[in-house]
Amino acid sequence: MSKIKQLFEPADMTVGTPWKRIAMFSIPMLIGNIAQQMYNTVDSIVVGHYVGDNALAAVGSAGPLFNLLLVLFVGISAGVGIMVSQYFGAKQREELSKTIGTSITLTALVSLVVMIVAPMIIPGMLRMLNTPASIFEDCKDYLNILMYGIAGLAYYNILSGILRGMGDSFSSLVYLLIATVLNIVLDLYFVAGLGMGVAGVSLATAIAQGVSSALCLVKLMRMKAVFDLGKKELKMSSRHIKQIVRLGIPSGLTQAIMSSAMIIVQSLTNSFGETFIAANVIVMRVDGFAMMPNFSFGMAMTTYAGQNVGARQYDRVHQGAKQGTIMGLAVSAFMTGSILIFGKYLMMIFTDTPELVDLSVYVMRILAAGYLAVAVSQCLSGVMRGAGDTMTPMWISLISTVAIRVPLAYGISWMTRTPELPYGRFECIAVSLLISWILGALLTVFFYRKGKWRSAAI
């Protein structure tokens, strides 16, 4: 029983064998990230089978815009996570307490602003993206409902990030699994049972995310042995807000840059018609699972580096970076290989249309090699962010997505235009993404080796 209890407790990553610490921390996160990906995946499966391919296209087309609307929360979560891991590693209880309290109050205020403003700008942004009329209303309804329930998503990401910063990746996993099961049940009830369509899947997601965030909050309120959480801590501290903003803005901007690039490319994607849009949605859902090991090890390396930098153990950071990257590459290779082998059967989960299945498998094969490059980028970027250097990963994302991917996608599209293909070949979407991933990995290795991150600790 004591070993089970330890799974739910904070973990000190400044001691023990680095790869074992990273692996024990990463495994629950990998499972949790797969579960979180199930939110959107189940949405797509349910609407694809019970509503139709156009509804599937609507849910997928809404994704890049939804991610753009989340940039403020991404920034808060990144800044808070880095501060929590470093203060926890440095054993500074008062600073840890004030960071957590300030983040909880700040998230409430930002959620209120987004809840009011986002529904006002969503229709205009969808028009700007040339969203086909056949899926416009479904896209709008899907996004509006998610925005009205934004507090649940925001608090889950920020509170689970706090738990991870203290080395506890197991608690947020359990809460997310509960929410995922609830999401699946509600998806089927609202869409298959009540016939609510796309609105039903977004409502199910909003409710499930609210439940997971509430469970995280209850867990934090019970951790009195580690930090304090009273009225004094919940009162926002300008010093801590400035620190959260300084550390978080680059991560938020990175999310904004990537989402903006995806939105610009989405406009090109939309020009190829509903069939390719739907196929692209299927690929992105499977892509989400292929990316899970990379994101999991990236977050693990952020916490690992943060705690060890807080304890000023830089040799241990280097050792963990090498071991974590090797593990990330191995797991990513296994996941990517499995998807290539069983890809056709995975695509058939989303649709019964043979043309969509074949098109999705073809695009996935183009992207395959890029997942190994992303594994390297995520692990080493995680080390830099954990150390407090959030600017370097931001610039790398800016270069690889805006300066490389977007021009490349439109350039290939333009060069391959023919009378039969007025918008060029659809492969431009996947090829541009693959090249940007590989170049991004090379830049990340270069800047990690330069070592600017060593002097970025708070």
Image: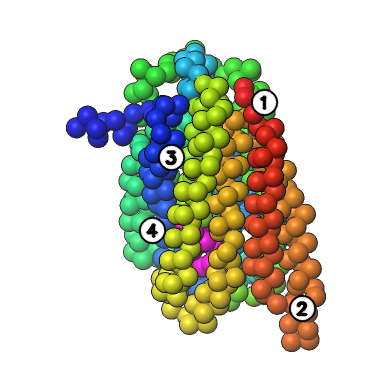
Q: Secondary structure at mark 4?
A: helix
| Label located before the other in sequence (2 or 4) | 4
- Mark 3 lies on a secondary structure that is helix
Residue 438, by quadrant, is: bottom right
Q: Is residue 125 left or right of residue 325?
A: right
Q: Mark 2 vs mark 3: which is more N-terminal?
A: 3
Which residue is at 65% across, 46% downward?
A: 445
Is residue 264 positioned above or below 209 on the image?
below
Badge 4: few (under 14), some or many (20 or more) residues near its Cα, within 10 Å? many
Where residue 416 is drawn, which disc sits there? 2
How many dots with numbers? 4
First-in-chain label (1 vs 4)? 4
Q: Is residue 375 visible?
A: yes
- Give the Cα separation between the discs numbered 2 and 1: 47 Å
Q: Is residue 245 above or below residue 197?
A: above
Residues at circles 2 and 4 in contact by the CB criterion of under 8 Å: no
Q: Which residue is mark 1?
A: 455
Q: Is residue 119 visible?
A: no
User: Looking at this view, is 118 or 264 the one in front?
Assistant: 264
- Region of the chain picked out in magenta, as a range: 280-290
Q: Is residue 387 above or below residue 204?
A: above
Q: Which residue is mark 3?
A: 19
Residue 318, given in percent of the width and then of the height, sits at: 56, 35
